Image (tube, helix red, strand yellow):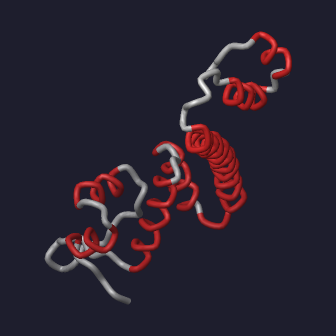
Amino acid sequence: MKRYTIKEFSQITGLSTHTLRYYEKIGLLDPVPRNTSGYRDYSEDQLRQVEFLKRLRDTGMPIQKMMEYAHLRKLGKASIVSRRQLLQEHEKQLIEYITDLENNLQMIQWKIAWYKNEECKSGDGLEESNMIEKERGVDTNEDAKAGGERA
């Protein structure tokens, strides 16, 4: 099995040596064995751990939840159900966040298309305002009668 110095491991993972030491200190990473000179001697197992931790971090999992996951992982097979539940909870939050992002992106794309098509020459803004009100679930027929720009 390939072994890595902390400098090599830092370059491979993209995490600073400081972050690697911190992750080990707070228990996110299993204790890293030392070589005969006393230096950290990272393995492929730690590489897989770090790659997964980076995915959790990159998807917005709070460090406390990451620490909870790391603690459960150390418990072995007895914690498989708890680990799955923790990851499913995170998955649900990610799906909700992605849905929100997609909705926001659609509205921005619609707004860009509106500006391209209208080139801001209509002046009354009713079509734009009606689209936004429809997104909010408001009856736009009444709004059109009132005749005002909202966005």
Q: Which residue lies furthest to the bottom in this view?
A: 1
Q: 64 and 139: which one is in front?
A: 139
Instruction: State left or right for residue 1 relative to residue 19.
Output: right
Give residue 116's quadrant in the image: top right
- For the C terminus, the image quarter is top right
Q: Which residue lies furthest to the left in this view?
A: 37
Q: Where is residue 150 in the image (x, y as percent from the top left)?
A: 64, 18
Q: Residue furthest front?
A: 121
Residue at point 75% right, 31% down?
A: 135
Q: Where is residue 30 in the image (x, y as percent from the top left)?
A: 41, 63
Q: Position of residue 121 (x, y in %)?
A: 56, 31
Instruction: State left or right for residue 146 relative to residue 31.
Output: right
Q: Where is residue 136 in the image (x, y as percent from the top left)?
A: 75, 26
Q: In this view, does 122 lie above or below 92?
A: above
Q: 89 and 104: which one is in front?
A: 104
Q: 139 and 144: which one is in front?
A: 144
Q: Is residue 125 above or below residue 4?
A: above
Residue at point 40% right, 73% down?
A: 47
Residue at point 81% right, 13% down?
A: 145
Give residue 35's quadrant in the image: bottom left
- For the N terminus, the image quarter is bottom left
**Tag count:** 0
Residue at point 18% right, 71% down?
A: 39
